[in-house]
Image (cartoon, rainbow, N blue to C red):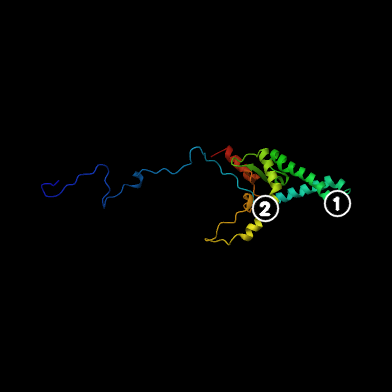
Amino acid sequence: MTTPWGKRRTRNPSGPTAPTRGTALPPTSARTPVPAPGPAPGHPVGPRLPPRAGDTRRHLAVGLDCYFCLVTAGLLARPYVDASTTVAEVLGLLAGPALAFSFLNQVVLTAVTGAGLGKLIMGIRVIRLPDAGRPGLWRLVRRWLYGLSLLPLQPWYGLRSFLTSPAPGPDAPHPVALPNGCTGEPYTDPSGLRQVRRRDLAAHRDAMAFPH
């Protein structure tokens, strides 16, 4: 359509028009704010779980548990060792008290107090994931059986992973997969439990009881 002056008039499109060159944009405060991404529905945000206790602390706790286990087994089996004639009989006499002490320490005492004797001395507590609660008896039994069957081989898996893993770099391949779900890290817990420091667990429980 043309006007009397000879200029062609275009029809305005329906809806908002794009800003032409030289047109100033509205100020930032006038723009529609974009909401920040929040937590997914059904997943409340709470205090972070306490971190895992350090390797040195955990290794010392395991060493103390082994020491107390051997001392207790030796004291209980000492009256019968002198009458034994073979090494197999001595090992058999030591195995029974050692297994009994290990079960009482790792399962019963942990279920009651939250940690075994060595962990109590080193200020470690065993928690259940993901709610940081006290582990149940069945999980502790699974953890104890796992420790008896696979834990003695963890140092070998760690050494093999260290010797066979390539040097770190951007082109380094993925680490070597170990059998039975092992990660090469000593004392990996497969039962959904975590060893944490007592003070970190206390701080976590205080944060849960009095959220900000």
Of the image marks 1 and 2, the number of the one nearer the N terminus: 1
101 vs 195, left or right, is: right
Question: Hey, which quadrant is residue 113 in on the image?
Answer: top right
Q: Is residue 189 above or below residue 175?
A: above
Residue 86's mark? 1
Q: Secondary structure at mark 1?
A: loop
Residue assigned mark 2:
154
Question: Residue drawn 74% across and 48% down?
Answer: 65
Question: Residue drawn 80% across and 48% down?
Answer: 71
* Residue type at the position of mark 2: Gln
Q: Is residue 175 above or below residue 142?
A: below
Q: Is residue 58 visible?
A: yes
Question: Hey, which quadrant is residue 199 in on the image?
Answer: top right
How far from the left and from the top, in percent, is residue 22? 26, 52
How far from the left and from the top, in percent, is residue 132? 61, 41
Q: Nearer the viewer, residue 167 or 21?
A: 167
